[in-house]
Image (cartoon, helix red, strand yellow):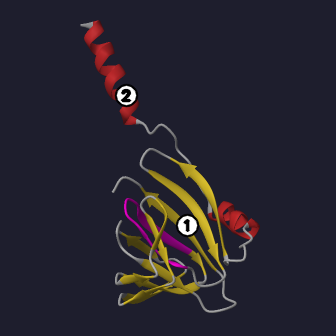
Amino acid sequence: MRFLTFLLFAIFLPSAFPAQVDLFTAKDLQGVAAALTPKEAGFADKNLARYGNHYFLLAKREQTGSSEMHEHEADVFVVQSGEAAIVLGGKIVGSHAVKPGELRGTSIEGGERRHLAAGDVIHIPAGTPHQLLLTKGKPFVYFVVKVTGQ
């Protein structure tokens, strides 16, 4: 009986607690954002942590980005600061693969335009074209959860 109790304990205890707990405070994220220096494309990001089927990063844009689509990753954006429009759906103009499962282009034809501001959260399913559109001179910082294997 003791062995059975031990076996059940050994099987179920590890799954009861996460392997790793990470906390990214608002102050932590503000510090990371302040250190991000967008390159000539007006974009910079920092990988924060990787887990089994998802990972976190913080991104900063200072200008409109390319259109993109991730075939096997969903995106969840949590807007930290700034405002932007996002175009979702439609067709990527000038679509080309930048790596397996990742398409980029110059813009989106068709699609639906939505407004994003600090505090907003948006889920973008895998296979959905999207593009952030910024007003010149107004930076946009967002926390990203990338969910893989979609």
| Main SS class of the magenta portion in the image | strand
Label 1 environment density (alpha carbons within 10 Å; few <14, some 14–19, many ≥20)? many
Residue at the spot 44% in from the left edge and 77% down from the top edge: 95
Residue at mark 1: 143
Mark toward the viewer: 2 or 1: 1
Q: Which circle's residue, 2 or 1, is located before the other in the chain?
A: 2
**Three-letter amino acid code at the position of disc 2:** Leu
Q: Is residue 105 above or below residue 3?
A: below
Q: Is residue 23 visible?
A: no
2 in relation to 35, above or below: above
> Badge 2 is on which residue?
13
Which residue is drawn at the image coordinates 72% and 73% (left, top)?
A: 39
Which labelled disc corresponds to residue 133? none
Q: Image check: 133 left or right of 37?
A: left
Q: Position of residue 48 (x, y in %)?
A: 61, 54
Q: Is residue 73 left or right of residue 3?
A: right
Q: Secondary structure at mark 1?
A: strand
Relative to residue 60, is residue 145 drawn left or right?
left
Q: Is residue 77 magenta?
A: yes
Q: Amino acid at mark 1?
A: Phe
Give the quadrant of the N terminus: top left
**For residue 40, above or below residue 133:** above
Q: Mark 2 Cα within 10 Å, few/some/many (few <14, many 20+)?
A: few
Q: Tell me where the magenta segment starts and ends, as one range.
A: 66-79
From the top left corner, tell me how far across and down residue 5 is, in percent: 28, 14
